[in-house]
Each structure stands twice: as C-alpha cells, then as structure tokens.
C-alpha cells in the first residue's frame, strides 16, 4: 500500500510500451505503478518514477521487487514459470497466476489444454523428431512449425515446404509443435478482462491485419462480422478466461476460415489488438487490466464511435525528416488523429508507436489511420 495515497501498489514486470501505456492509465486512478525494467532506456522507464532495473529471470531480483507491491503483473510472458510459482509460494500475489500464464508461455501446453476443452484450434501435433513433422504433413506441404516458447511478432514461426526444411529446422534444437496451414479469410481478436471475483467484460471483436508476421492495423468493430458470430467469439474468449482462471486482460487471437473460428494464440496482458481502446472505448484495456488485478469492478467497454482504426507506426527507411518535423506535418494534416509514440529509437520495421482514428465509417477511419502511420514512418502521406 502506498502510504501517500492509501491505494495499492501494482508491480509490472517489463517496461516496454505496454507498461508505458499502463502507467498512463494508472495516473488518473491515483495508483502507483512500480516497474521492473531490463534497462533504464526501456519505454516505460523513461516516463515512470518507481523503476527498478534488474533481471526478471533472477529470483532474488523478482522477490525484492515484489516485496514493495500489493500485486505483480506483466507486460510480457517471459518470466520463467518456476520463478513465478516460487513467488506465489512465498506469499506474493501474482496475476495472472503462474498456472494460467503457462498457457501463454508454452504453445504445447496451450494447445493440449484447449484441445481437451474441445475449443477449436488448428490441427496440430507434438514434435519429438523431424519424422513427426513429416508424418504429420503426410505429403501436404507447407506445414507450420512453431517454437514452443518465446516467439512473437512473426518470430518463432516457420512455413516448412518439405522434408528437407523439416529436418533442417529440427536440427537447430528448437522445441517445436507443428500445425496445419489453415486457409483463412482474415484474423480476428477477442479481447476480454476477468477479475478474481469472476466478473468479465468484453470489447467488440476486431480484425487484425498482418504483414510479415507483424500486426499493422486493427479495425473495430471487425468489418462485416455479423452479430451472431461476434457474440460467439466473445463467449469463446470469456470461456477460455474462466477455464484457465485468467485474471487481467486476455487476448484470444482467432483465425476466421469463413465458416469457423479457430484459436491461434493467447496473450494474458494488454495486447496490440487492444490499443484502439484508449480512445475508442469508455474503458481502455490498460485501465481495465489495472482494475482486474486489483479486483475493482470492471469498466464499461462500450465503443465511443461507430468506427475505430488503429495503425502501428513502424520504423521506415533511414534518412528523411526527423520525427518532430513529421509530427508537425501530421497534426497539420489531421488534427483529430491520436498519436502514441513509445520512446524507442528508430530502425526499419520496429514498432515505434501507433495512431488511432475515430470516424463515422470504417473506410474513412482506416484511410486516416493509414495516412497518419505512413507520415510518421516515412515522412510522406
């Protein structure tokens, strides 16, 4: 408890852009957000005051950090599970808990549990040898191989074209699962939150647009998704949150095949597909995550406009005008667009921030968000 405010201290392991935006959400609530950063140059560490720089894979560091927190949560899933279990055994409150978080840390654990619950996922198999991949393919290539742990933003995913590729990947020693390559219409995301009390809240289902394994756009609500399928997706995400005992925000990434919705990935923290909620929802995912881990009643998730489009700002080619000049031009071009920059140095393809446009139609919102992201990334509309 913070003696100055009488309010709880939330500890967040990780100090990237998710922690940075969670810090912003904590300020109007009067909450103290304590951060465990890998570096003093991390995006959230640049703006927060209560920052510990240390190694999140060292138990002594985690334990000292947790001692000053009423609850510990995360902006990434990379803390080893055994250390989280040790923190819990020592009496620290960790949310989401280690048992839930294991399903976001380990793709094999996640696929096994969802399959046991009869939740639809792509056809998949455990891989103990290159032969397992080859037999799973049964002559039908490509096959998708995924690293069991650690992959994100397209990393840790391989599209294997044949037996030789399977043997070469297996020889690297990476622990894998294999999945069928699903023919999809698009990708969707169902974002929900759950409190320890068991209260749940769901945002509109969104469409996520991927390029080179990186999400470049999020459209809310997902264009052309009928109410029946949208409600089914929300119910599916709520069921997963309850079955896995998730506390906080849960993002369920979905493949839309045109006839079915298949679960692709889970994230148990604020998620890129929910950044639009800062301006586009009465309660942002970041405020909701704080409410959930503190067991406050959850906020209303109603959209603030008929159409919300978010575009990620990726580092563009070297050279050209600086970011300050680009901001000047962007605000002159579209004063209503909302910009969130993460305090990162630029390099090609790196997520530097995002922009959000709210409008009466999705076509117009999307056009504005794309133009704004392009201006910040490339210095051109």
Image (cartoon, rainbow, N blue to C red):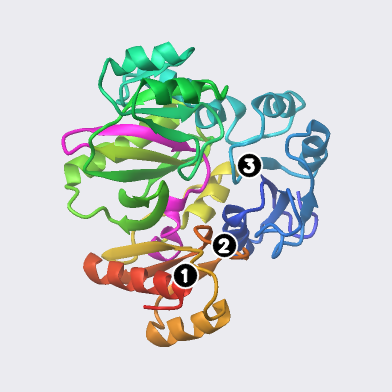
Mark 3 and mark 1 lie on one chain; the one further toward the N terminus is 3
- Report crowding for label 2: few under 14, some 14 to 19, many 20 or more residues within 10 A (C-alpha): few
In the picture, measured across the screen, residue 29 lies left or right of residue 69, that is left
In the picture, measured across the screen, residue 119 lies left or right of residue 327, that is left
178, above or below 60, in the image: above
Q: CA distance from mark 3 to mark 1?
A: 32 Å
Viewer-nearest residue: 293 or 64: 64
Secondary structure at badge 1 equals helix
Residue 116 visible (yes or no): no
**Residue 351: horizontal and vertical position, in percent?**
52, 58
Which residue is tagged 2? 347
The residue sitting at 45% across, 20% down in the picture is: 167
- Report crowding for label 3: few under 14, some 14 to 19, many 20 or more residues within 10 A (C-alpha): many
Residue 276 inside the magenta-drawn segment: yes
Mark 1 and mark 2 lie on one chain; the one further toward the N terminus is 2
Q: Which mark is residue 41?
A: none
Q: Quadrant of residue 344?
A: bottom right
In contact (CB < 8 Å): disc 3 and disc 1? no
**Residue 308: horizontal and vertical position, in percent?**
32, 64
Placement of the C terminus among the 4 image quadrants = bottom left
Which residue is tagged 3? 73
Which residue is tagged 1? 377
The residue sitting at 41% across, 46% down in the picture is: 213
**Residue 47: horizontal and vertical position, in percent?**
69, 65
Viewer-nearest residue: 319 or 52: 319
The span shown in magenta is 257-281
Q: CA distance from mark 1 to mark 2?
A: 10 Å
Q: CA distance from mark 3 to mark 2?
A: 29 Å
Residue 244 inside the magenta-drawn segment: no
**Residue 275: horizontal and vertical position, in percent?**
45, 57
């Amino acid at each position: 408890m913070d003696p100055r405010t009488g309010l709880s201290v939330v500890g967040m392991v990780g100090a990237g852009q998710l922690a940075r935006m969670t810090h912003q959400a904590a300020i109007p609530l009067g909450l103290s957000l304590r951060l465990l950063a890998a570096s003093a140059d991390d995006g959230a560490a640049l703006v927060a005051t209560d920052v510990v720089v240390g190694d999140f894979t060292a138990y002594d560091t985690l334990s000292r950090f947790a001692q000053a927190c009423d609850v510990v949560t995360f902006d990434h899933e990379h803390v080893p599970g055994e250390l989280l279990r040790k923190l819990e055994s020592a009496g620290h409150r960790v949310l989401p808990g280690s048992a839930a978080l294991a399903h976001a840390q380990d793709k094999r654990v996640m696929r096994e549990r969802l399959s046991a619950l009869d939740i639809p996922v792509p056809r998949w198999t455990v891989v103990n040898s290159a032969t397992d991949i080859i037999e799973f393919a049964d002559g039908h290539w490509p096959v998708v191989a995924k690293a069991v742990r650690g992959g994100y933003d397209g990393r840790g995913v391989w599209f294997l074209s044949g037996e030789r590729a399977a043997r070469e990947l297996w020889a690297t020693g990476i622990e894998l699962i294999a999945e069928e390559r699903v023919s999809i219409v698009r990708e969707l995301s169902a974002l929900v939150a759950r409190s320890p009390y068991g209260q749940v809240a769901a945002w509109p289902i969104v469409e996520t647009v991927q390029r080179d394994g990186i999400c470049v756009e999020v459209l809310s609500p997902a264009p052309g998704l009928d109410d029946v399928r949208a409600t089914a997706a929300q119910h599916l995400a709520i069921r997963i949150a309850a079955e896995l005992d998730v506390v906080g925000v849960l993002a369920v990434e979905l493949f839309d095949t045109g006839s079915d919705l298949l679960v692709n990935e889970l994230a148990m923290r604020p998620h890129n597909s929910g950044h639009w909620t800062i301006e586009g929802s009465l309660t942002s995912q970041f405020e909701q995550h704080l409410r959930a881990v503190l067991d406050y009643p959850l906020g209303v998730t109603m959209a603030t406009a008929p159409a919300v489009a978010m575009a990620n700002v990726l580092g563009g080619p070297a050279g050209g005008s600086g970011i300050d000049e680009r901001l000047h031009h962007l605000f002159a071009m579209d004063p209503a667009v909302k910009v969130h920059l993460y305090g990162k140095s630029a390099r090609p393809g790196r997520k530097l921030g995002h922009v959000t446009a709210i409008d009466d139609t999705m076509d117009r919102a999307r056009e504005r968000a794309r133009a704004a992201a392009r201006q910040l990334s490339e210095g051109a509309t």
